[in-house]
Amino acid sequence: MLIHFATKFFVIGGRRALKEAMSEKKRILIVDDHREIRSAVSRYLEKNGYRTATARDAREMDARLKGGRFDLIVLDVMMPGEDGLSVCRRLSAEGVAPILMLTALGEETDRIVGLEIGADDYLPKPFNPRELLARIKAILRRAAAGPPGEPIAGRRLRFGPWVLDSDRRRLTHDDGHEEPLTNAEFRLLSAMLARPRFVLSREQLLDLTSGREAHVFDRTIDNQVSRLRRKIEADPSRPEIITTVRGGGYTLSADVRDAP
């Protein structure tokens, strides 16, 4: 009887431990129309401690997202139906999950556009599985650490006529208008709000918002600043909140304080 009880105890305990371990694993959704790539990436990531699900197109992806939360999405650009760039723009606006885009080798335009509309990183095909794993780990580390400029996490910050709720990623004007932010725009604004009136070079902004090396696509930051200015400046052609420093970069030229 004692042996039976002990056996039952360890079986139950083992199942509980397994369930807890499974719940702690990060969930990754792989969206690619090539079955071989989906299967190979899924097997490799599960071998390295992740839980995965796959989808062959945007429709299947949406169905998977309705069924549960994912910590990261690996998204191919070239897919039948709704393409990866359109999907990235949609998911980024909704703040669903960090996105790692897979692009055809040499398609620099797709990579630039993907970064501008909210992708967290990109990886050209064909790729080394170890590099894919390293980039996924880096994205998840950044996501776990919260927005750039850790002091703003969990706060509501007022700057000019705007209030940013950093937890809800909600940007609201004094007139009540709410302006949606993509993931990229939120990271850029967060980095600048954490360092008001401090000149940030393009290289610094790339590092703070993307974690990539500074030589990657300088004009990506310029385009993101332009998009953000169109949302928060009264006159984007004469910006007063995010100003350009000749030869230096950009600065948030507004006082930042906690909002009630």
Image (spheres, rainbow, N blue to C red):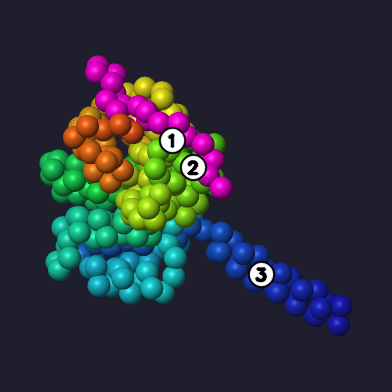
- Name the secondary structure under disc 1: helix
Q: Which label was assigned to residue 16?
A: 3
Residues drawn in magenta: 242-260
Residue 222 placement (x, y as % from top left): 23, 33
Residue 213 vertical position relative to residue 62 in the rendered view, above or below? above
Q: Amino acid at mark 1?
A: Leu
Point out the residue furthest to the bottom here: 1
Q: Which label was assigned to residue 157?
A: 2
2 vs 3, front mark? 2
Q: Earlier in the sequence, mark 3 or mark 1?
A: 3
Q: Amino acid at mark 2?
A: Leu
Nearest the eye: 253 or 149: 253
Tell whether label 1 touches label 3 (CB within 8 Å): no
Residue 18 vertical position relative to residue 136 in the rendered view, above or below? below
Mark 1 sits on what residue? Answer: 193
3D distance between C-alphas at marks 3 and 1? 44 Å
Which residue does the image show at 59% across and 61% down from the upper left? 21
Which residue does the image show at 31% across and 56% down from the upper left? 93
Tell whether label 2 touches label 1 (CB within 8 Å): yes
Nearest the eye: 8 or 234: 234
Residue 42 placement (x, y as % from top left): 36, 61
Residue 141 placement (x, y as % from top left): 47, 43
Q: How many marks?
A: 3
Q: Earlier in the sequence, mark 2 or mark 3?
A: 3
Which residue does the image show at 16% across and 47% down from the upper left? 110
Quadrant of res 31:
bottom left
